[in-house]
Amino acid sequence: MPVHDPDKFVQAMKKLAEENNSPYRRLLSARGNIGEAELPVIALGLGASFFVKEDYDGARRFFHTELDVAADNLKNVLDGLQIVAKNYHTAEQANILDPDSVKDSAAKIDFSTGDIKGGAELVATGFLWTLAIRHMFIGTALKGAGQISVAAGISTALWLLCTPLDTELSDAQSKWESAAEHLNQFILSLSDVMPLFAQAWYDSEGADMFTKYMTTLKNEIHEGALLVAGTASTLKSIHNHLVRAQTLWFGYSMAVLILLIWLQATQAAAPPTAGAVKVVIELVGGTLGKAVGSWIGLVGETSRAVLISAGLAPFLMQSFTKEKKAWSYGGTQYDGLDLKSARMSTADLDVLMHKY
């Protein structure tokens, strides 16, 4: 008889799917966390959005789709186990699992909504920025100091481009971390469930197929947990860099504005033509005139190029996993997350349910 202990078999099923900390509920929770880890358009700052947002959305779509497939297939397997249990149980015990406990929540997420979220903030920010620049130029319209005003505008614009929405980024990072934890807990809780199945159900083709399926799923979930945790780490790294870049450009803007205030306070009609102040103006404002010396202009332009590189280059080096790709971690080589392969076909499910 394939099911040697029907009561223990039912107990194993409940631990697999019905309890709050069951592997199945953990899988649904991980999928839900990733579905909620949405970022508005300007969450990464206007500048970073061009470099990072598309890759981030691609990663979220990839992981959500993989977990969606895994959850859907596991639900089909659970339905098959229900039939196995009913074949060896009395009619009074036919309702093995509480339907509400194993109900699969809505899995689809609308990425188009995520892509336009924050559009109103983007328009408002652009409007305020236009007003700020206009007033900046009016307030600093000193004869011969126009290029310093341009420098102030550029530095303030760069500060704006690097300004993240801290709350949204922190929340998204937390969702990815929570998803990784649920996947890790899936593996741990499964280690308590499978021995019960092994004791209650063996010596059958269906039992062997189920064990093989759960082993494959466990291995893929382990890989998924590492990759999801890596996404959270990447997002945190980007957030930290945005804060550093924002601080850098804020300091740069303040230096320019303080210089402008000093010029207006002293009613300077033009930048100084000699002394250390001339060098400071050149470094902050860029190449104001050929009369001050080409080497000073070169230093000024080079300094700003370094600052811009410091603000943008790290974004170009960030990457998110958004497709199956081989990778290694801790000396272990992985072939790339592919939960679509960890599944039971219709023919396999038929074996699971009916081949004793």
Image: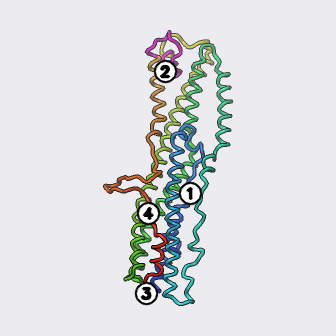
Question: For residue 283, which numbered disc appears in the image?
Answer: 2
Q: Is residue 311 magenta?
A: no
Instruction: Judge depth for marks 1 and 2 and give the one in front.
Output: 1
Name the residue carrying label 1: 35
Marks 4 and 2 sit apart, C-alpha to C-alpha, by 59 Å
Asked if residue 17 is positioned above or below residue 32 in the image, the reply reads below
> Distance from label 3 to label 1 (Cα)?
39 Å
Identify whether 222 is placed above or below 286.
below
Residue ID for mark 4: 341
Between discs 3 and 1, the one toward the N terminus: 3
- Going by the numbered disc 3, the residue's amino acid type is Asp
Q: Say if the magenta span includes residue 290.
A: yes
Identify which residue is drawn at 55% across, 43% down: 44
Residue 301, position as x, y percentages in the image: 47, 22
Q: Is mark 1 on a helix, strand or loop?
A: helix
Q: What residue type is labelled 4?
A: Ser
Q: Distance between the residues labelled 3 and 4?
A: 31 Å
